[in-house]
Image (cartoon, grey):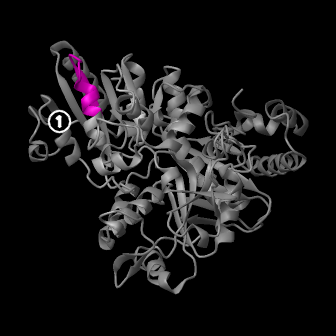
Amino acid sequence: MNHGWSGSFQDFLDISQDSFLQRLQRTIPDASESQIKAWVDSFHKLQVLFYTFPNLKGSLIFEYQLIRGGGRRPDVILLIEHHLIVIECKNYNEVSQAELIQTSLYVRDLANYHSAVLASNVKVSGILLLTGDKSDRVTNDPNHNIFIASLIGLSRVIQKVSKENHSHVLSLSHFLSGHYQPSPSVLEAARSIMKNEELPRVRALQSSNFENVHETIRSIIHYAQAHHEHHLVLITGEPGAGKTYLGMLVAHEFDNAVYLTGNAPLVDVLQDTLQNETFVQSLYNYKMEYLKHERVPYEHIIIFDEAQRAWDANKVDASLEKTTVGKRQLSEPDIIMNIATQGKPWSVTIGLVGEGQEIYSGEEGGLPLWNQAIQGKNVIVHYKDPASLFNHATHISKEEHLDLNTSLRSHTALNYSNFVSNFIEGNFAEALAFTQDLDTSHFHLRVTRDLDKALAVINELYTDDFKTAGVVYASGRDHQKQVTVLPWNSRYEIPSKIVQFFNRPDSEYHCRTLNYAITEFQSQGLELDFALLHWDDDFYIKDSEWRGQYFQKNVKHPLQIKRNAYRVNLTRGRDGIVVYIPSKSILDETWYMLTKNLKIPEL
């Protein structure tokens, strides 16, 4: 059963405390003493409240389990007229930020990921109910888009709602038979692909062009195979738009396909998650098969993650062993296009392009490297932008459906990536325009100068082992950070520490312990449900412009690389992110810009 108890308001008034508790304990047999005490408190006080509404039509649900929601359960759900009210009960009068965020996330989840709610278009709202409050309080919390109410205040809400009359009402049976399908994380999506499960029909997906992009790729592959042609397909998209998911999906659908990434942490975590070492492969090992052993891998479909970050020839040469001969002065795009076209009648190379995410030295050549790589190879290019970039293509096909235009990572905060892009580029007036809708969409962006408070709030957010929350920061001055960076692996250490960070709740290195932080090099391509970004004086605002220091060595545009590191880290949180800015004078203008000019709420 996916809930503890459900029934009409009259059923609730008729049931005894013992029968009520027995039902709940059958569903949650390991309930703690404090949990049972909270159930008894809620039972009695809500019964008293509903005795004042003897003719009220509607239903209650206690402890509804959000399947695939990491074991999370809203305390109470009320179905009255055209309203679904999510209630979290607290038997004290002070509330924490974590409880406010938690209640807000329940509203978001049910409004956007429950099939019956979506079909009925019912109005979803949330109430943090203070069962010990004797006042008539009902206050709107605009920062979380929920209400805080006493029992008398809840009575006022019910009275108002019950006077409405709608012909279409969400019934209890309809709600309980509906499916809760949240937007999957990268790791959840990978598991779904391996099980041949469809991507959940979530609102964020419905408003995106994901399926159009997917179908365009499939059509190009079938056409290339039928007509014996070589194609280069470049797919763009903002962080979290589903590029990695799309690439893995295509790799799984076609037998002669491989998904390559130079992101070693992503390879480690995905291979551990899937218990499969062939589905996702290391770009380094793949190219060394060609360079060192002079073997051409057999795949006709090559998916290259983060194509804009491909290494130039100098970086490739610097990484090769001295024994490697005969293949010098090749960039990674050169190597991949050689593999794709050498001795093969057809091929499709798919480059997944994350704009503004170049973070390593040797990655600044960008897409022009791919133009150089196709010279003389008779390759057709599919891309969203003008043909001038690919003057070595046999033909340019400007494709409408090769740009993933909606973030799936940030759930309903569809404006958040626009905020990040403008903020990081210094377009502060434009960034402000996108901050206003974040709270109404239940995406939680907060700033603080109190690290202990931030850690405490994030530590309270999730009570199960499935949700992830952790600390991220930009590399450069690791020793000055207040949370230790995840250490290097010991020799032959399995599982690796990055695997332990994401996949091993019992490890001291697990993200939820908040003992260790990861940098942009470890977080890119992966995601947390909630992130704490430790900002510092390596990237700061002075005289309304971004400045930086402690730059990565051997890069052409060090400030842009630093900018990209912060762009990556700002987009790691699926439910929200807290930005911690230390109390350093050099960061005062950055703090002022966020809190005063951009009006981001303090934690």
Does the image show residue 182? no
Range covered by the magenta-colored residues: 336-349
Residue 217 lies within the magenta run: no
User: Residue 442 in the image: x percent, y percent?
Assistant: 51, 55
Q: Is residue 278 left or right of residue 95?
A: left
Q: Is residue 282 above or below residue 164?
A: above
Q: Say which element carries label 1.
A: loop
Q: Is residue 253 above or below residue 595?
A: above
Number of labelled discs?
1
* Snapshot quadrant of residue 133: bottom right
User: Residue 286 in the image: x percent, y percent?
Assistant: 41, 31
Q: Nearer the viewer, residue 449 or 347?
A: 347
Task: Say which quadrant the C terminus sits in.
Answer: bottom right
Q: Determine the residue positioned at 73% across, 39% down.
A: 62
Residue at which label 1 appears: 374
Q: Is residue 555 left or right of residue 504?
A: left
